[in-house]
């Protein structure tokens, strides 16, 4: 498959995976979140079951050549917030950029965040992933933007401290379970955006109910740099090592998508005052005034 070859960019995925060809009547992911949103007052906070507990057993961190994944075993589930069912949490993973580029998949008013974290949950009625891929609401993915500050995020350290053990493709390491809630924003979890879209990696199935949280997770520059410069898409013994960078899919048009804002989401309140043609128009007028 082209997906596993070097220089195979997301625009060529459709050659090997027909469902990765965007069709106008389908809503592909990721998208840009802008002001074309419909407020839905029935979208309250989600219920994150088991996220505040330390799960038994161990978790597994893995470099699959496309991302770093944390497989979290059983014991956690998400529901509520307009989700049609209960979804069991399977894994979380990341999308990032390069040394000087941002790499979130979704963008907000055209702005790309440095990184994006996806918590993947599968509808509990399905016995396996292939059954869930055939269901338009088979998966619920919780997306969190990751932004950078100067201080380390100690909770994020549970993951970033283990990254050196999974630098190369195919490497795995055990991780001691920690409360997943500690990774997430402490407040404002009722502020999110919702739409029905697709997986952002092959086979790009239209099987995802997306929940994109408005408030980002903050990590330090050095924690971000561990992803952008110390993870490789190649195996340890490869002749040429290739850093794993810019592992995000391109943004798709939203013609056929309805994007909802939760009851408490703030994007609609923050009207685009400083963007668009109006300020330019005023500058132009002011320039015409002599003196
Ligand atoms: C609001 O969200 C609920 C739960 O997802 C859904 O059933 C309902 O159709 C939505 N309403 C509108 C107007 O989109
Ligand atoms: C990239 O992220 C940084 C840090 O959040 C931000 O200041 C910058 O505007 C972003 N760049 C783009 C092109 O979105
Ligand atoms: C997945 O589950 C479906 C539905 O029960 C079943 O038909 C199919 O054989 C299973 N596939 C795999 C790969 O286990
Ligand atoms: C978080 O919620 C509080 C109160 O609900 C609000 O005042 C604040 O602006 C929100 N923060 C962000 C970043 O949206
Ligand atoms: Zn993802």
Image (tube, rainbow, N blue to C red):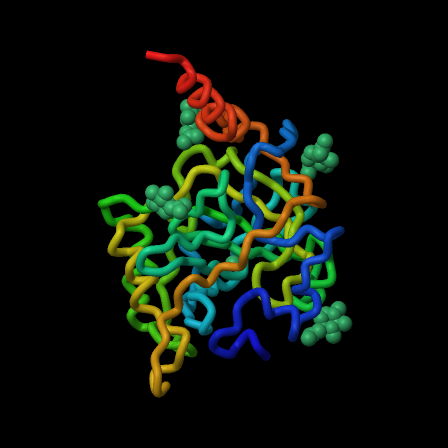
Asked whether residue 52 is in view, the answer is no
Q: Is residue 123 left or right of residue 4?
A: right
Please name the residue shown 52% across and 73% down the image.
Answer: 8
Instruction: List x then y, in percent, for residue 281.
Output: 49, 23
- Residue 210 versus residue 12 in the image, above or below: above
- Closer to the camera in the image, 30 or 194: 30
Please name the residue shown 50% across and 28% down the image.
Answer: 266
Residue pushed farthest right? 25
Q: Is residue 96 left or right of residue 100?
A: right
Q: How many marks?
A: 0
Quarter-of-image position of residue 239: bottom left
Instruction: List x then y, in percent, for residue 84.
Output: 70, 45
Instruction: List x then y, in percent, for residue 114.
Output: 38, 51
Q: Which of the four quarters of the rendered structure image does ligand 1 lie in? A: top right
- Closer to the camera in the image, 102 or 172: 102
Q: Is residue 135 left or right of residue 150?
A: right
Q: Is residue 172 left or right of residue 193?
A: left
- Closer to the camera in the image, 41 or 246: 246
- Residue 21 versus residue 275 in the image, above or below: below
Asked whether residue 32 is in view, the answer is yes
Please name the residue shown 62% across and 34% down the image.
Answer: 36
Q: Quadrant of the N terminus?
A: bottom right
- Residue 187 versus residue 232 in the image, above or below: above
Please name the residue shown 31% across and 46% down the image.
Answer: 148
Q: Quadrant of the C terminus?
A: top left
Instruction: List x then y, in percent, for residue 169.
Output: 41, 77
């Amino acid at each position: 498959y082209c997906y596993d070859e070097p220089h195979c960019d997301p625009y060529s995925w459709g050659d090997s995976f027909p469902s990765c060809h965007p069709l106008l009547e389908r809503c592909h992911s990721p998208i840009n979140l802008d002001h074309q949103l419909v407020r839905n007052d029935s979208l309250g906070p989600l219920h994150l079951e088991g996220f505040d507990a330390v799960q038994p057993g161990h978790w597994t961190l893995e470099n699959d050549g496309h991302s770093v994944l944390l497989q979290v075993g059983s014991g956690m589930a998400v529901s509520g917030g307009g989700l049609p069912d209960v979804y069991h949490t399977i894994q979380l993973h990341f999308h990032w950029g390069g040394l000087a580029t941002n790499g979130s998949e979704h963008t907000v008013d055209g702005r790309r965040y440095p990184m994006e974290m996806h918590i993947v949950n599968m509808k509990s009625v399905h016995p396996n992933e292939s059954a869930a891929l055939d269901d338009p609401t088979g998966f619920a993915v919780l997306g969190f933007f990751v932004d950078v500050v100067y201080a380390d995020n100690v909770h994020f350290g549970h993951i970033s401290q283990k990254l050196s053990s999974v630098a190369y493709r195919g490497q795995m390491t055990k991780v001691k379970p920690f409360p997943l809630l500690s990774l997430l924003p402490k407040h404002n979890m009722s502020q999110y955006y919702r739409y029905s879209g697709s997986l952002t990696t092959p086979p790009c199935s239209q099987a995802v109910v997306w929940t994109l949280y408005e408030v980002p997770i903050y990590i330090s520059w050095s924690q971000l740099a561990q992803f952008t410069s110390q993870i490789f898409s190649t195996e340890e013994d490869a002749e040429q090592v290739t850093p794993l960078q810019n592992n995000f899919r391109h943004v798709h048009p939203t013609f056929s998508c309805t994007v909802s804002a939760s009851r408490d989401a703030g994007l609609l309140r923050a009207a685009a005052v400083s963007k668009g043609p109006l300020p330019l128009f005023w500058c132009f007028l002011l320039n015409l005034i002599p003196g």
